[in-house]
Structure formats: structure tokens, C-alpha cells
Amino acid sequence: MIPAAFEYSRATSVAEAVDLLRRGGGEAKVLAGGHSLIPLMRLRLAQPTALVDINGVKELDYIRMEEGRVRVGALTRHATVVRSAEVRRHLPLLAEIAGEVGDPQVRSRGTVGGVLAHADSAGDYPTLAVMLDAEIVTDRRRIAARDFFQHLFTTPLAPDELVCEVVFPAAPGPHRYLKFRRRLFDWAIVAAGVQQLDGGWRVGLTNCGPTPVRATAVEAALAQGATPSAASAAAADGLNPSSDLRASSEYRRHLARVLTRRALEQAA
């Protein structure tokens, strides 16, 4: 299908991008990689009156290590994250996850900020952000990841607010991220991530509800000395994932337990 008519503007700075969004009166959308937005527009499930292209905002394209934190600009491409020596040294799980996003074409154009702002519970970066207590930084405030993902495709962002960066804690220790999917480049039916941090384990689940899930019951069991097998039995506690053509709700709960156990065993 053909998208509905829209105005197109190209920004070269954060201030200009925000101003263009403000002029859109709540009906403008940000265009970065476009892998989610353009298909929605083609199906007319999204009909913005204006697109603000931020690919010229070079100040949002960076990876920096500062005071034990890994700062990733919103316009940073997945492929850049995969290749980054800083990321591989200080937060290798992020590089591992970036390498699992889509195919080479998607990784070359898709952006970290775009995945976060889209807030799809099947996305990989949101799970990592929630399980590591990351911060999403916009042009006007800092938002804890646990408060950023409010529901499927829903965040606290204002219509004229722009995601600028995500800040992760450095975590070079044992880690693993496992995705279960039908085909190599598919979205995960379910995924599980584990990361050793501050003497304990962080555990996150992808596509097990309307938002990313931090499996705190598993973390608590591990802290009390449970084995990966015993702790992972709690991975489905409180989960109520939706059923669809790819998997039933019960099967997703089963996958949450199995993938969490495997990720913990492989990380250890």
C-alpha cells in the first residue's frame, strides 16, 4: 500500500528536531532507521502528518565510556554497537544482543534509540535496559528504564520529546542472551538474558508480556544459593504472555523457564 500524504523535514541538530516535532502539533513522527515506522505507514496503521528525519543529527551518533557507564547515542546503528571495542570490553552482552537484531541490512540502518522509543516488547534492547536498570535520556529529562516502558508501544515521551541516549552500567562479567525463533532473522518468540552484576545476577525476558520483564524471583533464588535449574523454575512467576499464531501463552511460559536455565548454565 501507499502511505498517506505527509510533510518531510530533515533536522541537523537536536534543537531543530524538537522544534520541527513541536510544529507538527502532536502528529509528527521521528524517522531514523524507519524499519518499524515505514511498514506501519505503508499499511496506514500510522498516518503522521509530518516526518522529522534525524539521520543528519550527528551529535546523537556515539558510544562513550564515562565513570563506569556505557553511553550510547540514540542514532547509533546496531552494526556500530556490534563492532565497538568499548562495548565489547565494558558491556559485551550489549554487543551480543546487537548482533542478534534482524539481518545485516537492518543492523546497518536500524538505531538503538529507535528500538527503545518504539517500545515493542519483542525488542531486545528494552529487555537489557530494564534488567540492568539503564536510563533513557531525552532532550529534557532522564527516565529509568523500568518507568519508560509503560505498555506495548507506549512510553511517557511527549509528542515533541526526543530520545537522545541510553546509559547502561558497565558489566563485563559472565552473560548470555538466548532467543527462540522460527527463522534466523525473526523476532524472538521468547528470549532470555542473564548478566552477572555487583556480585549477583540480573535476569530479563523478552516477549513475555506487554513490556520487558525483569525476572526478580529468579534473581532472588540465585542470591539464596539456588542452582540455575532450580532458580529458573521461577522464571514464569507472574507472567501472562499473550497467545498468537506462533505460540500459546503456556508455551511462552515454558520457554521462559527453559531459556532462563540454559542462559544461566551457559553464562556460568
Image (spheres, rainbow, N blue to C red):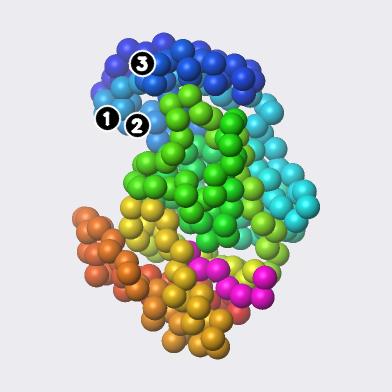
**Residue at the outermost front position:** 141
Q: What residue sits 48% from the left and 42% below the top?
A: 115
The residue to which callout 2 is attached is 39
> If the image is split into quadrants, where does the N terminus sit?
top left
Q: What residue sits 38% from the left and 28% below the top?
A: 38
Q: Residues within 10 Å of mark 2 (few under 14, many from 20)?
A: some
Q: From what the image shows, is residue 105 above or below residue 144?
A: above
Instruction: Give the prevailing secondary structure in the magenta stretch.
Output: strand
Amino acid type for the residue under numbered disc 1: Leu
Q: Residues within 10 Å of mark 1 (few under 14, many from 20)?
A: few
Q: What residue sits 47% from the left and 49% below the top?
A: 147
The residue to which callout 3 is attached is 49
**Residue at the outermost right position:** 67
Observer-nearest of 104 and 260: 260
Q: What secondary structure is marked by label 3?
A: loop
The residue to which callout 1 is attached is 45
Please provide percent x and percent y for residue 268: 60, 79
